[in-house]
Structure formats: C-alpha cells, structure tokens
Image (cartoon, grey):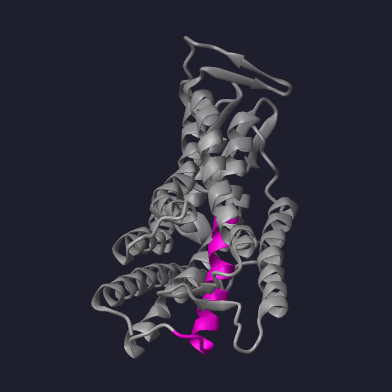
Amino acid sequence: MLSRGPLLGLSLTAAAGALSAGAILVVVYMVARHVVLVRRTSGGAPQSEGKKRPIVKTHVDAYMISLLVSDLLQAVGAMINVHHVRVGRTECSVYCTAQGVLKSLGEPSAAMATLAITIHTFCVICFHWSPSQPQKLVPCLVISAIWLYVSLYVGIAYALHHKPGHEFFQPVPYWCWVANGYPEERISAEYIWLWLSVFGAVVLYVPLWLVVRGNVEVSPWRFTWCPSRSTHGAAFDRMRQSLKMLLYPAVYIILVLPLSVTRWIMFSGHDISSTWTFVGIVPFHLSGLGNVLLLLLTRPSILVFGKPQERGTTKMQLSRMPEVFAISVHVEEGVYDETVGDKSKVLEE
C-alpha cells in the first residue's frame, strides 16, 4: 500500500495532467467552433474562398499539432494515477499497461516535436529559409518519422519483452512505465530524446540570439562576426517574432530539468525520496498547459484563430507598401516578403 506522501504526489501529478488535457481540449473546441462558424458564414461564398483558410498554414502549425497530440497522450497517462490513488497501490494491471503505453508514446514524441520546432526556427533565422506555403513535404516527413518511431518502438518492445508474470510495463514504483530491468530501453525510448531536445535548444539558442542581435551574419557557407552591428527595422521584427518560437524549447527545458536532475541522481546510484521524485515529475506533466499558453501568446492566429476580415485587412495594408526596399514583415498569418517586382509573396516562418 502507498503511504500518504506518494498518494499526495500521485494526486498532484494527476491534477497536472488534467490541467494540461483540459487546456488542450479547450484549444480543440475553439478551433472546431471557429471552423464551424466560418463555414456557416461563408455558406454562399465560392469554393475558392474556403480554401484560403486552411487549418494548417505553416510548418510550425503542423509541428504544434503533433506537439499538442503528444501532450494530450502524456496528460491522459498522468491522469491514470487517479486509479492508483483510488486503490491505494500501484500494481500490474490493464491500467498499468495503458499508462506505460501512453507515457511511452507521448513523452518522447513531445520531445521530438519540440526539437523539430527548434531546428526549424534555427533554419528560418540563420539561413533565411522560407519554404513556400503549399510545401508541406518536410513537416509531413518529420511528423511521420516521429510517430512511426514511437509506435514501432513501443509495439516491438512490448512484443519482445512482455510475458505473463514478467510484464514490460511495471510499477516504477509509484506509477507505471518501462520496468527497472530494461535500462537501455528506458534511455532509447525516452531519456535520449528528452536530453537531445534540451541539448539542441541550448546549443542553437546562442547563435540564434547573436543573429537576431546582428552580431553574426550568415552567408550560405560561412558565419561573419560583426561585434558592433545591430539589426533594426522590419528584418529585426521578423527575426524577433520568429525567435518567439524558441519559447517552446525554453519552457520545455524548465519543465524537464527537475525530472532530469532526479534521474541523473538515480543513475549515479543514489536513492531519491518520494518527495523529490514528485517535485521532478509534477512540473513535467504541466507541459501541455505551458504549450497551450505559449500557443495563445506567440501565435494567436495559429489553427485559424483570428477573424478572417482582419487578416484580409492586413494583406491589403501590406499590398500598399512602397516597393523600394526588400523588407520582411511578420504578421498574423506568416511573413510577407515584399521585393521589387514581387507582390506580397507569402513566406513561412
């Protein structure tokens, strides 16, 4: 039977998962409601008008959908702790297997999606990569690879190691996950992706910040150091807005760091009290809530948020800009690049 401390920790973990799941479902409701309203109000509009408002408009939109799906799976897995609290113990059962599967699917895929956002932001800012709007091959390949990996890994590992009386997903000890007898599977299934995402964010953040400040110029084959130079104007606004996407890996680092510290201590052979175990795991299960708040803060127009008439006004205002200098302006729907002789070509962040 679980003592009062672990029961409280499991309750807090389940509450964190419920907050994340609730926030994600609110976003789903808002998107669905907006789509229904748009279809109702444009019932008499031509077919081409409806095509102007796709749900997924940019690469980041696709990565965000994948990230939110991962967060939802992770949150539901945390909410299964309610069952452990209700029965007063954690034991091998259908609930235990379900929790292990959900955690093994959601947690590494969330780390991979966060890493994809970091790399995408790095390419956009440092190399001025602007894929055309209809080009969805890259995010489709990335997202397919993420879910194919986690699905095959969980399915194959479960088929190879799960035996009656020797389950692959077992209590560890307060919730259910990969059993203690499979340390290599634990690392390759989740920890390597959590730490790779954190490492990638830390390594790429420094050059991104220097580029935004104007201290580094990036040409196709080299980096040029400009210690006294700073970036201003529309180009700076574009890069600063793109840099907001690094808030996702930044928040991810903050939420993963306590969990990672406790795991490193355990790997070194030291025991961790239940209090510190839950201090590390509870914030980790708030990642869904954190990503939803960042979504509303950094990309309010993502997934067709915002009023269509406002977006039309923005495009009209941009079309009236003088075509003298090559500028890039970040607006709700993306980055509109206006160059001499090229009318408002839509680029993607």
The reply to whether residue 347 is visible in this rendering is: yes
User: Looking at the image, is 163 positioned above or below residue 270?
Assistant: below
Tell me which corner region of the image, top left, top right, bottom left or bottom right, holds residue 5: bottom left
Left or right relative to 175: residue 304: right
The residue range painted magenta reads: 91-113
Q: Residue furthest front?
A: 269
Judging depth in this view, the residue of 17 and 262 nearest the camera is 262
Q: Residue 299, position in %: x, y?
A: 46, 50
Q: Main secondary structure of the magenta part?
A: helix
- Say which quadrant the N terminus sits in: bottom left
Q: Quadrant of residue 102?
A: bottom right
Tally of numbered tags: 0
Q: Nearer the viewer, residue 128 or 202?
A: 202
Q: Is residue 208 magenta?
A: no
Q: Is residue 97 magenta?
A: yes
Q: Nearer the viewer, residue 167 or 109?
A: 167
| Residue 210 relative to residue 273: left or right | right
Q: Residue at x 60, y 82 (%)?
A: 167
Residue 55 shows in the view: no
Please state if 341 lies on the left or on the right of 330 as rendered.
right
- Residue 11, how many percent across, how many down? 30, 75
Q: Is residue 72 above or below residue 237?
A: below
Q: What percent of the width, then of the height, locates residue 215?
A: 51, 17
| Rendered residue at 41%/82% (across/down) | 90
Is 57 placed above or below 47 here? above
Q: Nearer the viewer, residue 87 or 242?
A: 87
Q: Quadrant of the C terminus?
A: top right
